[in-house]
Amino acid sequence: MIFSTLEHLLTHISFSIVSIVITLHLITLLGNEIIKPYDSSEKGMIATFLCLTGLLLTRWIYSGHFPLSDLYESLIFLSWSFSLIHIVPYLKKRKNYLTTITASSTLFTQGFATSGLLNEINKPTILVPALQSEWLIMHVSMMILSYASLLCGSLLSVALLVITFRKIFYSSKSNNLLKLNESFSFGEIQYKNERNNIFQKTYFFSDKNYYKAQFIQQLDFWSYRVISLGFLFLTIGILSGAVWANEAWGSYWSWDPKETWAFITWIVFAIYLHTRTKKNLQGANSAIVATLGFLIIWICYFGVNLLGIGLHSYGSFTLISS
Amino acid sequence: MNTLLTLNPLKPQTHLIKFTNFKTFNQISNQRCLISTIRCKISSQQSKDATKNKVVVPGAAPSLSEEIEAPATAAEEDFRRKKNGGGFMKKLSKRVLAVLANLPLAIGEMFAIAGLMALGTAIDQGENPEYYFQKYPEDNPILGFFTWRWILPLGFDHMFSSPVFLGTLILLGASLMACTYTTQIPMVKVARRWSFLQSANTIRKLEYSDSLPKASIQDLGVILSGAGYEVFLKGPSLYAFKGLAGRFAPIGVHLALLLIMGGGTYSATGSFKGSVTVPQGLNFVMGDVLGPKGFLSTPTEAFNTEVHVNRFYMDYYDSGEVSQFHTDLSLFDIDGKEVMRKTISVNDPLRYEGVTIYQTDWSISALQILKDDEGPFNLAVAPLTINGDKKLYGSFLPVGNTDSPNVKGISMLLRDLQSVVLYDQEGKFAGVRRPSSKLPIEIDGIKVEVVDAIGSSGLDLKTDPGVPIVYAGFGALMLTTCISYLSHTQIWALQDGTTVVVGGKTNRAKIEFPDEMNRVLDRVPEINEPPDVICG
């Protein structure tokens, strides 16, 4: 009883803190000069991290097994991983662009876990025989950590794509809204460009472009670094899963849907890493691959579970029955 | 006057020596620049070997060459072969290698494999042809073209063993080998050479560069080696590197993948598999259960081993759900001698001379009952629900005339080995009894006592000679992937008067690198005295 109350409390505290942090982030976005909200949002994320750690520990003690046996627990673990990724650079005293993405990702996963959608299954369940192994901790925690870091990395790539092609997005948007205005502004841009060709580039213009290019490069580097880390976790996760399967199911690889999709994810991010080795494929091209990877992780994490097929159906049938 | 002279870093006496040195340095640095503009084309680097030897001290350290462009390399090697008048076959194989090592091709193959696997999970696997005729009919194609005519001839109903999929995998394996051979191994040869940079301008053109006024290159060297770098010092120039393994690890990743592919192939062609459901107390011979999977499968001595199921039992949670099931197995060799005994459970298989026995399933085979204190009789138990994850078994004890067409009797239902639910002839609930409780129940005037519920153990047997190879590949892959995360960092520095010009580059941690460099350079002490050391 005391455990479930504590768990309930921690869930809601962490969710509210993350919501506040997101609001603070929005405020920081509006008024870039204010540093105070940014700092307190960092403290908020640390509090969230502690709450989620407490939540997981409570659940561990309460249920007697590592809390990764169903979808709800894996979601909590996912948001824990996000907050971990969030605070590691902060503790190293390094400011980066990851924070916005990790904070909002934590909000989403935590919100989904706390929402009524999964209300039926958030009671600690018993562990089926196949899950009773030490490999559970290694395999599932590695997989979820890799999902978290790959999601962060590919979201950075999505951001890169959006910034690179913002002009195109913008013009297509205005295309729907006001055609006349659009053509007018296009004319203006052309006029501007001509002017720039004739005269020397204005200082302001090149300066802005320079910052944009630098920002894109930073995003690119971060995304590459985080995805490499996630790829490392994914490799370890898949391989430990294969070793476990050889102990429990009698074969290290059985083309189970979840396995297959994890392998697809692995291949897509392997492609991403290979596109990085070629100079002419870097930037937008590799970002497109990472964006594809983002969708595939979701299919792998949720899609396969929702269908409830294959051997990995531990977290799934309860969701469908509810 | 004297003070003025000492302020000048190059004293007249040393100046002469320095001058001759300086000239050669200049020459060399020009050549060095030439090499660095050509970059990473191996054959051109090799052709410059004669000049490079002046600059490069052979040793285990990398040069500044970037990633190698595979097609160019291979094409150039091809070209050289032609000049040497190599045979046609050699030319052809070079051409094939060049095509296979092409990165866009490899990326295309990876996308193809990913796509085929996705398709394999989207299409239900291993069904009858009729199923596909019905689900993918010709008159209503999915996406306007996808019908069973695509699935059956291409073997997409068994995607993961279809020729299309396996062919793509083999192609990818070939690409892996070609890439390792033509791109990565030459890269090692190049990276093993290392060099000093002799011109401050070249250093300043690097990704990261800085100049430290009033500093000595020796101090920088000491601090860099303290920060984990391998440092090489020669005269006024310094070269340091860290994380060389990170540059070589991708080769290891490729080799590990090839090892896994090879092991997987051996597994698929050389293994035996089989599953059996054995009631408690019965036995079977391994060889009868195991069936060959491929043409390399050869039975071993161990196949004559007889397996006896001594006992099958289950553990339950307080809520009544099954928590684990165990089978006590004894193995007897051909002479009837017991060679092994082990209680297996899910996640804890038995291994004997290459054969592995897994606990995978359970069911209930028989109910032992006493009818009016007679018996015990064994009643056969049949599974009642096939789908759904809750199992249900049923049995029937006929009452009265068993020869009449509509026999009536007592029905018994079981979910597990814990309890039996009994129903009378009319189908009304009569009671629940636990086996071995010795508590009889009277139904329609018949005294029934459930003595025991006999479970049967679902076992999977397997021999897989590929597992050691695959596991070796797994270990190597994990290790090399971890090492691949390391960033290969190279630093060059040159003492230019009292100023030290430092530059460096790294291949992965491009964000952290400037920070790390700044931290290192902050620790280099400032020298107020002019550094005499460099002149000596």
Image (cartoon, grey):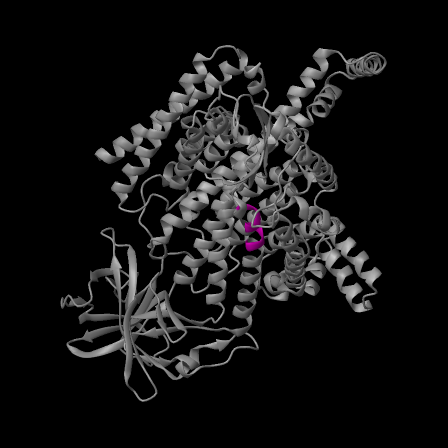
Q: Quadrant of residue B423?
A: bottom left
Q: Nearest the camera: B351 or A106?
A: B351
Is the residue B20 above or below the residue B84 in the image? above
Is the residue B189 above or below the residue B370 in the image? above
What residue is drawn where x is 58% and y is 64%? B127
What residue is drawn where x is 29% and y is 42%? A60
Does residue A86 show up magenta in the picture? no
State which quarter of the image contains the C terminus of chain A. top left
Q: Name the spot of residue B467 as percent of width and height, x first.
A: 47, 66
Q: Quadrant of residue B5?
A: top right
Secondary structure character of the magenta stretch overall: helix
Q: Is residue B385 visible?
A: no
Does residue B249 show up magenta in the picture? yes
Is the residue B379 above or below the residue B107 in the image? below
Is the residue A198 above or below the residue B325 in the image? above
Q: Name the spot of residue B297 as percent of width and height, x first.
A: 52, 77
